[in-house]
Image: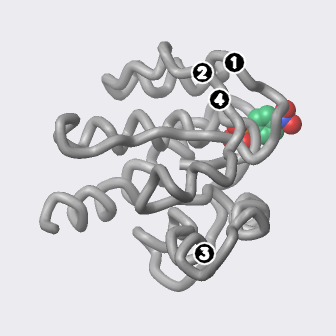
Amino acid sequence: MVCLGNICRSPLAEGILKSKLPEDNFFVDSAGTSNYHIGEKPDSRSISIAKHYGIDINKQRGRQFTTIDFDRFDYIYAMDNSNYRNIIGLARDTSDRNKVKLILNESVPNQNLDVPDPYYGGDSGFDNVFKMLDEACNSIADKLNNN
Ligand code: 4NP
């Protein structure tokens, strides 16, 4: 799960998808394309909205996406088109590029929609983001659990 800062959207996506998959079989992680918030906890508004829906993301810490992540993961979900382009820019070959998906295409196929960046907005933005990611993660978990 990849966004820009790895403090608002992707920590939520990580927590939500983890909650829908058996932890023995899947490794779910998140990262940011930027180095702005390395080592930091998720934004307090993301921690709050996750807690409201019964998910604890408090232990997560920000890290930056690196090329090595293409070797460590089978699927890489970008939160928006800008993140998508930045990740694709780091890909070494077609195999790397094929791993990268826009996360909302899982719930609303082929529309290339962005998860809006809630960083500069109010609390309602975080609830909206949570609901969008929950729906997308339902589709992802359905696919992965049935493989
Ligand atoms: P995120 O949100 O990409 O969902 O973690 C942001 C967090 C921080 C910044 C931008 C977006 N920032 O510019 O510091």
Ligand 1 has an atom within 8 Å of the beta carbon of the residue at disc 3: no
Q: Gap in Å between the C-alphas at discs 2 and 4? A: 21 Å
Q: Gap in Å between the C-alphas at discs 2 and 1? A: 5 Å
The disc, 3 or 1, on the residue closer to the chain's N-terminal end is: 1
- Callout 1: 10 Å neighbours few (<14), some, many (20+)? some
- Callout 4: 10 Å neighbours few (<14), some, many (20+)? some
The disc, 3 or 4, on the residue closer to the chain's N-terminal end is: 3
Question: What residue type is disc 4 on?
Answer: Asp
Tell me: residue 4, above or below residue 144.
above
Question: What residue type is disc 3 on?
Answer: Arg
Residue at label 2?
61
Q: Nearer the viewer, residue 45 or 91?
A: 91
Residue at label 4?
123
Does residue 144 appear left or right of residue 70 in this picture?
A: left
Q: Does residue 121 appear anywhere in the picture?
A: no
Please say if the residues under marks 2 and 1 sit with CB atoms less than 8 Å apart.
yes
Q: What is the quadrant of residue 55 in the picture?
A: top left
- Percent across and percent down for residue 125 are 64, 40
- Percent across and percent down for residue 52 are 40, 22
Q: Gap in Å between the C-alphas at discs 2 and 3? A: 26 Å
Does residue 37 appear left or right of residue 143 in this picture?
A: right
Tell me: residue 125, above or below residue 70.
above
Residue at label 1?
39
Q: What is the quadrant of residue 96 in the picture?
A: bottom right
